[in-house]
Image (spheres, rainbow, N blue to C red):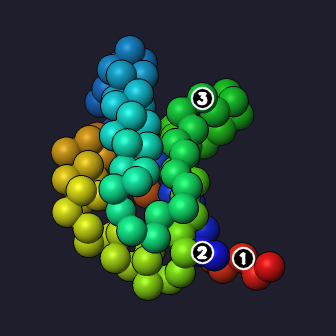
Amino acid sequence: MIKHVILWTLKSEFSAEEKQEIKKNIKRELEGLMGKIPGLLSIEVNIEGLKSSTADLMLDSSFESEAALKAYAVHPAHVFVADTFVRPYTQTRSCLDYEIFT
């Protein structure tokens, strides 16, 4: 199994209220991909970090294989969500992909 974890920081130009709405939209849209992309086993977006956090939100997702992760990256449903609800609002992105051995 492959884990795909992303941390984003939203652009500073947005107010606190705007950031809350943006985070809710990102969560709804990314989690809505479950069942639409082959090989996607789980997807969760955390938008309620502690004040000590240095990122605004986190994606935690699991895939059947590295090939499934690569297919997700270019899947039209994912690309639409990323281009419409994520990329226009985010300033920084950090990613960690790793394999879980059972």
- Cα gap from disc 2 to disc 3, whole angstroms: 24 Å
User: For mark 1, does the 10 Å Cα neighbourhood hold few (<14), some (14 to 19), or many (20 or more) residues?
Assistant: few
| Numbered disc 3: secondary structure | loop
Answer with left or right where residue 1 lies relative to residue 16: right
Residue type at mark 1: give it. Ile
Precedes in sequence: disc 2 or disc 3:
2
Which residue carries the number 2 mark?
2
What secondary structure is marked by label 2?
strand
Which label sits in the foreground, 2 or 3?
2
Q: Position of residue 15 (x, y in %)?
A: 35, 19
* Residue denoted by label 3: 48
Q: Are the two marked residues, 2 and 1, in contact with CB atoms closer than 8 angstroms? A: yes
Side (left or right) of 85 relative to 63: left
Where residue 91 appears, as percent x and y from the top left, is 35, 48
- Circle 1 SS class: loop
Instruction: Give me the residue at 55% from left, 55% from top.
Output: 42
According to the picture, the residue beneath numbered tag 1 turns out to be 100
